[in-house]
Amino acid sequence: MGTVAQTFGRIAGFAAVATLAIGIEAAAAREKITVYTAVEPEELTGFAEAFEADNPDYEIQWVRDSTGVITAKLLAEGENSPADIVWGLAATSLLMMADRGLLEGYAPAGVDKLSPALMDKQSPPRWVGQRAWVASLCVNTYEAEAKGLPMPTSWQDLLKPVYKGHIVMPNPASSGTGFLDVSSWMQIWGEDMAWSYMDGLHENIGIYTHSGSAPCKMAGRGEYPIGVSFAYKGAQLKSDGAPVAVIAPSEGLGWDLESFGIMKTAKNKAGAKAFADWSVTEKANRMYNEAYAVVAMPGIAKPVDNFPENIQDKMIDNDFGWAAENRKRILEEWEKRYGSKSAPK
């Protein structure tokens, strides 16, 4: 029959097995939400954990790549896409998807608390903005000094012969950051002057990357002294101790909105709506503000360490509709002119 201790041991063992089985069953019962995103990989775990803590019936399954790659993938897949929701992708990309009828209008609970300027004008909105990422220069101060390079303060400065071979920039076909640079230069100067500017800049470019954060990372490592990138990545590297100066060129800064939209063909539409509802909460907006200085919920954003001062004052009046409508034409011309310096894919 065994001792009392042995009996209690068997009971405890059965209880542990039962608890484990319940845990496995509960985990198996969680519904997966397939989320296409271009958000930086190091942020995704935190967002998933925060959402799943508030919504334990769901589990996020990320499909992540750079903006251009995710956009091309979604447009190619069309109505056959396995995505339930597109989250953290450029508003210009979501505009293209909306125009092709791929997004379902949905007003998340609490969306009225967000800035109406940062979402689709249709009701219900087909896409909703989350936070803005803003163009900037990342300059390795150690390498710049060692090579005798003056600190640039404007876009036009990058045309100076002293910078030849010392600049790296994202390919706008692969990178949303690259495209917001090109489209913003066209809005600042007009197309003719912008193409002339890029002809000159091309002479000084060492390589075009396929990621918007890569030029800043390369500058941080000293591979190139100057990276055309975005402020978040430069501020993050500087906070981590990299010898990087984050510069907002004086002529104005291109920017785009990380945004989300639910796919019309979503297989888990309830899960997609739950994630959309969570994504407009104050909790989510405070998480957005941990890395980005401009978020969709007014009154939430606090200054982010090492961002250029008053960066919002330099953000151009961005015409997302024009950028989305002309994207294909601009990228085809850009590739013809400058694609020879792109990094291998």
Image (tube, grey):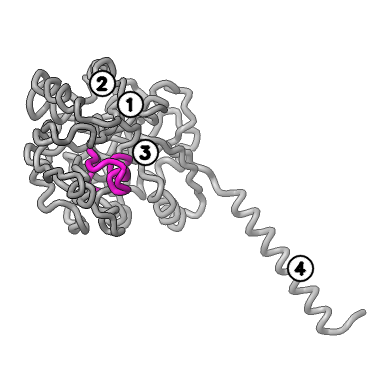
Of labels 4 and 3, earlier in sequence is 4
Q: In which quarter of the image is residue 9?
A: bottom right
Q: Mark 4 points at which residue?
A: 14
Residue 107 location, quadrant: top left
Task: Please state which of the two labelled residues, at mark 4 or mark 1, is closer to the viewer.
Answer: 1
What's the CA distance linking mark 4 and mark 2?
A: 67 Å
At x 9%, y 43%, the residue is: 153
Query: Gap in Å between the C-alphas at discs 4 and 3?
Result: 45 Å
Question: 336 and 87: which one is in front?
Answer: 336
Where disc 2 sits, the SS reads helix
Query: Is residue 65 depicted above or below 289 in this figure?
Result: above
- Residue 325: % across, % down: 22, 20
Q: Are marks 3 and 2 in contact (CB under 8 Å)?
A: no
Image coordinates of residue 221 in percent, x first then y, are 32, 48
274 up-or-down from 106: above or below: below
Over which residues does the magenta segment extend? 214-232
Say which residue appears at 8% left-offset and 46% top-offset: 313
Residue at mark 4 to residue at mark 1: CA–CA distance: 61 Å
Return the residue at label 2.
338
Q: Which of marks 1 and 3 is nearer the N terminus?
A: 3
Front residue of this view, candidates 213 and 133: 213
- Quadrant containing the C terminus in the rendered view: top left
Three-letter residue code for mark 2: Tyr
Label located before the other in sequence (3 or 2) = 3
As drawn, the label of residue 38 is 3
Q: In which quarter of the image is the N terminus?
A: bottom right
Badge 4 marks a residue whose secondary structure is helix
Can residue 285 be seen at all in this image of the molecule?
Answer: no
Q: Is residue 215 on the magenta stretch?
A: yes
